[in-house]
Image (spheres, rainbow, N blue to C red):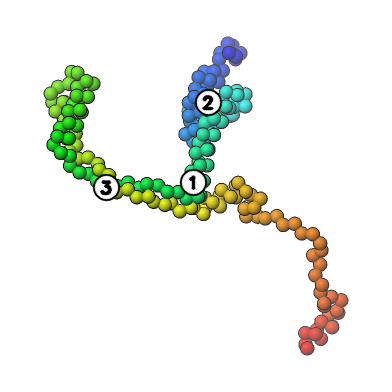
Amino acid sequence: MKQNKGGRKSKYETHVEQRLFEVECWARDGLIDEQIANNLGVAYSTFREYVKKYSALSAALKKGKEIIDFQVENALLKRALGYEYIEKKYAQVEMSEDEHYALQTVAVNRFKMENPEATLEEIRLVEMQVSKYKSVLVEEKTKDVVPDTTAQIFWLKNRRPDKWRDKQDVEHSGSMEVNNPLKGLTTEELRKLIKK
């Protein structure tokens, strides 16, 4: 371990080195470098220097950011192309007495195992909290999400800028000279033509 003058450890060693996994997770969660530096208790300018100096920190940031970037790319592509999904609708129906009693028994037994000193009143409360209703699937449909033209434009402008950017470079060869049949006429001759 490198130590500063006077024998103290650097902030990298005390604030960053042991938290590289957290750095990766924060990057994956979408935090920007400035926020990560703040979470570590390090000045942003110092953090930038550490990223240049320590390959382990740089690698943790890169790994975390790559994961979320891939997820966003995939979501953008999915949205650009359109997709199908299953929509499920549920209804609440009352359970039979036997089914409700069985669920109450399971809940009470679990509570008793986790709380061996529980009072009868606490056990009764757990029993009463078990709902008499359950969710039942009543309908399932396949739905389409149409392709999104904005996502398509964004994708194409970034992936194929040679064909899809707004400004196109056009090369022209040859002359831009236009034949003017009035070229060479005097002002007096032009006036006579206008009057005719």
The answer to whether any part of residue 175 appears in the image is: yes
- In the image, which disc is placed on residue 42? 2
Q: Residue furthest bottom?
A: 196
- Residue located 56% across and 52% down the image: 153
Q: Residues within 10 Å of mark 3 (few under 14, many from 20)?
A: few
Where does the image place residue 105, in percent across and percent down from the top left? Answer: 17, 28
The answer to whether any part of residue 38 appears in the image is: no
Q: Which residue position is annotated with label 3?
A: 138
Badge 2 vs badge 1, beta-carbon distance below 8 Å: no
Badge 2 vs badge 3, beta-carbon distance below 8 Å: no
Element under disc 1: helix
Where does the image place residue 68, in percent across and percent down from the top left? Answer: 50, 36
Q: Quadrant of residue 118?
A: top left
* Quarter in which the N terminus is drawn: top right
For the residues carrying marks 2 and 3, which lies nearer the camera in this image? 3
The kind of residue on which mark 1 rests is Lys
Inter-mark Cα distance, 2 to 3: 54 Å
From the viewer's perspective, tell me whether residue 51 is left or right of residue 128: right
- In the image, which disc is placed on residue 78? 1
Above-or-below relation of 101 to 17: below
Inter-mark Cα distance, 3 to 1: 28 Å
Element under disc 2: loop
